[in-house]
Amino acid sequence: MKDVIVNYHADALNTFRNYKKMAERAIEQVSDEEFFAQIDTESNSIAIIVKHIAGNSHSRWRDFLMSDGEKPDRHRDTEFELQEDSRDSLMQFWESGWQTLFDNVEPLTADDLSRKITIRTKELTVVEAINRQLTHYAYHVGQIVLLAKHFKGADWQTLSVPKNRSADFNKYLAEGDAKSTNSLDQALEFNEKN
């Protein structure tokens, strides 16, 4: 059972890293104007999504084994407003949010994963909290990728296996050409090679 827990922990960390990398690869492709652009008045820009994920990460993961995941100093509503934010300041906030996550999730032990914590006073196991955040971040990273792809159009550099290239990608993997064992990295390597 302990192996299952250790494998889950390693996979969760790898998945968080993949979400971060995928979002950053999408963000790298957009201009500052596109980074801040809203496609309509009700939508969020990439900048706002970055700010929200960072704010959420700071709140959820800081001291999360000992205090509620919704910290009193978090002002969630302001995450959806651009105040004197620049792309650089938002990306620094993004980076520190992810660092907070990794600093607190990496050292978890098998015993820690069965502990109970709270988020907005609701009791969860640490595994439930990790799963909650994995799905939350996946949702928002998907939004970032969709917006970046929308803005770049034909200039978009895919982050996965390109359309009509699945057979080529499978051959690439079968022939052992991939340097990485990580599926996101394998797709990126394939795209750079081809």
Image (cartoon, rainbow, N blue to C red):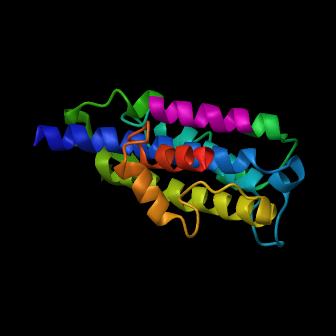
Most extreme residue toward the left, as rendered? 1
Main SS class of the magenta portion in the image = helix
Q: Nearer the viewer, residue 118 or 6?
A: 6
Q: Where is residue 63 in the image (x, y as percent from the top left)?
A: 44, 31
Q: Is 114 placed left or right of 67 in the picture?
A: left
Q: Position of residue 102 (x, y in %)?
A: 46, 32
Nearer to the camera, 111 or 179: 179
Is-magenta flag for residue 100?
yes
Seen at 34% across and 26% down, the residue is 107
> In this rendering, is residue 66 above or below 52?
above
Segment colored magenta: 91-102
Q: Could you tell whether 137 is left or right of 94 in the image?
A: left
Residue 153 image position (x, y, % from top left): 78, 66
Give the image quarter of residue 45.
bottom right
How many numbered circles does the render carry? Answer: 0
Q: Seen in the image, is 80 located left or right of residue 171? A: right
Q: Examine the rendering and report whether any part of residue 115 can be seen.
A: no
Quadrant for the N terminus, please: top left
Q: Does residue 114 sit above or below 169 in this rendering?
A: above
Residue 75: % across, % down: 67, 47
Q: Which of 115 and 4 is in front in this view?
A: 4
Quarter of the figure with residue 111: top left
Residue drawn at 52 percent across, 31 percent down: 100
Q: Residue at x 45, y 64 (%)?
A: 167
The answer to whether residue 74 is magenta is: no
